């Protein structure tokens, strides 16, 4: 089927006894993804952000560009295995504290829809903690739904609404 490119968002807001604090977890996750799934072509700097939902802990966020032979659902399954390796439990509240969260944001195939996966990620355009890191490593990657680049989406999100400049 050939190589696919993906942008993967990474997040962590819980320590791991073996990997340490959330920023170290994101860097370790990128290494494990490279070892088990495909080639990590770029890794963003780590930023911190306020939590979404009821969690009280701040998040470490990042993004990576991945090249792999895996189709979207196979990649999702592989990312879930890696999340579990880092201690993620997929039950209970969707926004609870977690050592690792990996989301497929975009892929080189454009739009993908399945019961358990939608690409582009449905909320990525409204999340600065996704757009900021993604813009640092893939600013010219286009959203297939809007036609805008990640850089343009990040600028739109950062610009106060109703203000002309």
Image: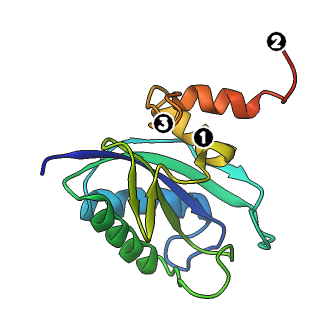
Residue in view at x 57 percent, y 73 percent: 99
Query: In what element is the residue under mark 1?
Result: helix
Question: CA gap, disc 3 to disc 2?
Answer: 24 Å
Question: Is residue 119 positioned above or below 90 on the image?
Answer: above
Query: In what element is the residue under mark 3?
Result: loop
Which residue is labeled 3 in the image?
Answer: 143
Residue placed most toward the observer, 52 or 72: 72
| 34 displayed left or right of 99 | left
* Residue 147 screen position, x and y as percent: 49, 29
Residue in view at x 44 percent, y 37 percent: 144
* Residue 160 screen position, x and y as percent: 84, 29
Earlier along the polypeptide chain: callout 1 or callout 2? Answer: 1
Quarter in which the C terminus is drawn:
top right
Question: Is residue 59 positioned above or below 4 on the image?
Answer: below
Residue in view at x 66 percent, y 67 percent: 13
Earlier along the polypeptide chain: callout 1 or callout 3? Answer: 1
Do residues under tags 1 and 3 come within 8 Å of each other at their CB atoms? no
Question: CA gap, disc 1 to disc 2?
Answer: 21 Å
Residue in view at x 61 percent, y 66 percent: 21
Q: Say which of marks 1 and 2 sits in front.
A: 2
Earlier along the polypeptide chain: callout 3 or callout 2? Answer: 3
Which residue is labeled 1 in the image?
Answer: 131
User: How would you rate the neighbour count of disc 2 (Cα within 10 Å): few for under 14, some for 14-19, many for 20 or more?
Assistant: few
* Residue 26 screen position, x and y as percent: 51, 59
| 65 displayed left or right of 48 | left
Give the residue at the far bottom of this rendering.
Answer: 92
* Residue 163 screen position, x and y as percent: 87, 21
Judging from the image, the colouring scheme is rainbow
Which residue is labeled 2 in the image?
Answer: 165
């Amino acid at each position: 089927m050939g190589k696919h490119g993906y942008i993967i968002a990474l997040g962590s807001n819980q320590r791991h006894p073996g990997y340490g604090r959330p920023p170290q977890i994101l860097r370790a996750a990128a290494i494990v993804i490279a070892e088990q799934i495909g080639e990590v072509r770029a890794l963003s700097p780590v930023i911190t952000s306020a939590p979404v939902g009821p969690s009280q802990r701040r998040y470490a966020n990042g993004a990576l560009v991945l090249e792999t032979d895996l189709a979207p659902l196979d990649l999702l399954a592989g990312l879930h295995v890696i999340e579990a390796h880092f201690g993620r439990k997929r039950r209970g509240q969707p926004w609870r504290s977690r050592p690792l969260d990996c989301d497929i944001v975009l892929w080189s195939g454009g739009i993908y829809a399945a019961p358990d996966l939608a690409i582009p990620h449905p909320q990525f355009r409204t999340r600065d903690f996704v757009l900021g890191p993604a813009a640092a490593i893939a600013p010219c990657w286009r959203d297939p739904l809007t036609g805008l680049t990640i850089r343009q989406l990040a600028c739109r999100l950062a610009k106060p609404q109703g203000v002309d400049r």
